[in-house]
Amino acid sequence: MSDWRKDVEPLTLKGQIAIPYTWHVGDVGSRFLAALRDEKKILGSRCPECGKVFVPARKNCGACFVDISEWVELKPEGVIEAYTIVHYSHPIQPVKPPFAYALIKLDGADVGFLHLIKKDLDKLKNGLRVKAEFSGERTGKILDIDSFELV
Amino acid sequence: MDKAAIVGVAQTRYERRKKDQIFADMVFDVTRAALDDAGLTINDIDSVVTCSNDFYDGRTISGMAVGDAAGGMDKNISTVSGDGTFGAFYGLMRVLSGYKATIVVAHYKGSEGDVKITTNGMFDPIFHRFLGIEAISAAALQANAYMNLYGLTEEQFAEVSVKNHGNALNNPYAQLAMKITVADVMNSKKIADPLKLFDCCPISDGAAAIIIAGEEIAARSKKKPVWIKGVAHCCESYLLGDRDLAKPVALSEAARKAYAMAGIKNPLREIDVAEILEAFSYMEPLWLEGLGFCKPGEGATLIGKGVTGMGGRLPVNPSGGALSANPILVAGLARLIEATLQVRGEAGARQVDKVNTALAQGFNGPCGQSHCVWIIGGKK
Amino acid sequence: MGRKVAVVGTGQTYHRSHRPDVTSREMIREAVTSALADADLKIKDIDAVVIGNMDHFESINYVDTYSIEGSGAFMKPIMKVSTGGTTGATVAIAAYYHAASGLFDRVLAVGFEKNSESDTTGAIITCSDPIWDRFSYSGAIPSLATEATAYMEQYGATQEDAALVGERDRNHALNNPYAHLQRPLTVKDIMASPMLAYPIKLGDICPRSDGACAMILAADGIAQKTASRPAWFKAVSVRHTYTWFGDSTDYNKGLVSMQQASQEAYARAGIRSPVDELDVAELYLPYTWAGLKWIEDLGLCGRGEAARFVGDKNTHMGGKLPINPSGGVISTNCIGATAMLRVAEAAIQVMGKGGKRQVPEAKNALATGFGGCFWTDVVILSSERP
């Protein structure tokens, strides 16, 4: 009965699920992205209970579960908390490797801000200071910050 | 606890590419094998939980592909979208609510999708996804934060890879069984610093099934029931920057609850073997810290001293762990199955001596955001 | 056996076609906050969270971990349950098992969808088997239309008979401040609306909505202290049989999953004559024909009798067994929340919190979920502790 299995040719089909998405950024996120685009400013928000300053700005604090209404403008500068240099290439990446991802503690923020570092990769170290470089053409997205660079 | 037991387990061999089987084929095989293992028929099962993920399967309502194969026809069935340890948790709750026996299945075919695209989908669509970050680069950030906090070295992580790939030589289900050295790991291809190829899990295909039953079925199952002593899960903040990646707080909390349920006060002394989900080498020491087997920052030392080796006080991942096969979703269930085999004394060449109590752990989300911890044992 | 469990609070967003002012996570929090307020609890009182939606409607992998700041599950257990259209009900049922198991006392269940963010049909088509069905499957409407024509053929029901279900639900929605479509629709309007796939016209079918729903469940002993009139779970039942579309095309048998699940639920709840013993039903009726055929499968009337049963206004407000006082799915359809809204609305009725849509003295309520491949979930709630 099972002899046919020895000779069977395993076939595959190529496919792709391609569904277009239009994510609503929401009022809070929209103000954050518009500030990047129009004013080259990075906005955070401060929780009224725990006092934490979040960036990107949040509508509410997850831990305290209360609304946040206070906006805080952050310096586009901070310290590398963690980083990795990526050596592989994939179409989802916005830049050719090698490049780095870094969690950056912006001055005045209490949480890390995830972004890219493209230059001076051999000089990267935890604790070094970096500053945001804004893109020339900004459209209201996280890549309106082109990347961070060593100060 | 002690009101429910694991009475049947089964796994496929894990492989890079299962060309001859679709999801339902794999799930049917493990369902049947788990029933055989327990000495039960599908009629003994009155509840079914499948674990599947629409992203990984490239299919909306992905549970649809495997419900019947898991024996779900005309039965109460549901689908947990997440790791098998969470699916098993739901299965347990259904048994504690009155069902006689729940079969929990998980399947994954890494060969059919693009895991960088699907795990990029874990990240916030507005703030993070366009940066291109996915599971590997996020894990690398966590490894960096962990090393930086405690002054750890890449060689210390490499030891995990050496140990687990070596352990996999004893596991007939493993995909990547290799005798390698720390130098081999250090010289393997750079992926995302500090992670190199041998620090990373492979892409895998496979399925697994587990049967959780109440006392009535446990009393008549073929194999010695393995009792569920304690289990808990916990989730921390979402955005990577909101977390201290070097401190697995959700794992610590899940472990604390699971230990309290199981009456465990000193995990290193009271647990005989642990199967934990280390998709990347650094995760093993970090999770050991979260699980309270040592103080924060000392996980790598514990491994370096040989405590977690096959002859050590707490062998960790005798199966070879996720570094030796990582079918996502299945991987956590495989940990629970391996822990079950250890308690039964049926782990073959990878058996640890005198196992009374075993720990299994799995997680969901980037960098172990949401962890599930199981304590199981042979005696009621 | 497990512990007895009751709903002690519900919350929902105002449902709209688009919610550009919030992300999914922020929208989830609106429903959670409102459920907490309804139960007079704080997030710290919640022991575990269950959440669900359909991944490809927002393209978010691991919604459980994504949602933490909105669902309130920070440093709590959260689990994701996802089963297509039935998701909202299977999430509520999972929350029920969380509490019944004895492991958790107060459990939060969350269902949501932002259908405005994707191509709903484009996403739904991917539920079909990629090898065998996807090349020919064109979404939910044509497969439901096939079911409808089979029913018409079998029992001689007319398009006007079905349209009355739409008129009823859309009228009921006027009493529900949360409903998405708040414009009444008559049989005439529905008959005049554009044909999509015979016999389904635009007026026969549910909309796509943005919205979220949350429920708080509590175990026996705690439920009574939390709510003055908790809605007790009397029975839950699920049937998700059929892997292949071809397996479910024997329409002459009726909707088998609904027959099986409802019969099991009635037996578990000790209900012999559902139409007499139930006071209100919130049914997942995604199109008007379901309001005929499926109420037969639920045993609310005899085979082929639904057109007359509905035509005699037995299921309108004030009738023998009001169906969908909320306006139902035809008025609001945020898919991952849709089936949960049925359970939550049934709870609202039992708890006597229905305001203008309240059915007087509703004690026993039936809720259903529908989705997947002609799948059914059934929940029966009661003001009486079982």
Image: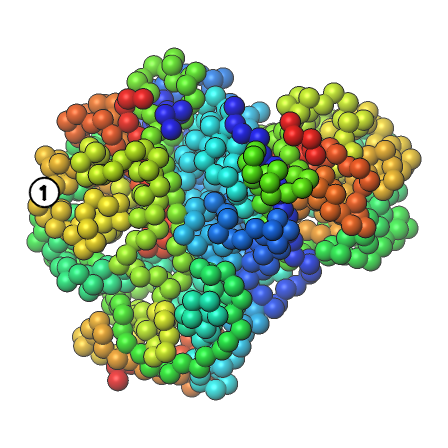
| Quadrant including the C terminus of chain B | top left
Q: Amino acid at mark 1?
A: Gly
**Up-down relation of residue B232 to residue A4 (above or below):** below
Nearest the viewer among B255 and C378 is B255
Residue C310: image quadrant is: top right
Q: Residue furthest front?
A: C225
x, y percentage for residue A94? 38, 70
Residue C94 shows up from this direction = no
Secondary structure found at label 1 = loop
x, y percentage for residue C161? 87, 39
x, y percentage for residue A110? 36, 71
Nearest the viewer among C77 and C5 is C5
Residue C184 shows up from this direction = yes
Instruction: Name the residue beneath numbered marker 1.
Output: B306
Residue C312: image quadrant is: top right
Write the residue at 34% across / 79% down.
A107
Q: Name the subunit of mark 1.
A: B
| Quadrant including the N terminus of chain B | top left
Q: Residues within 10 Å of mark 1 (few under 14, many from 20)?
A: some
Nearest the viewer among C195 and B216 is B216
**Up-down relation of residue C231 to residue A147 (above or below):** above
Does C276 sit left or right of A113 as displayed?
A: right
Write the residue at 37% across / 78% down.
A108
Residue C19: image quadrant is: bottom right
Does B377 sit left or right of C168 as displayed?
A: left
Write the residue at 57% across / 30% down.
C4
x, y percentage for residue B263? 30, 33
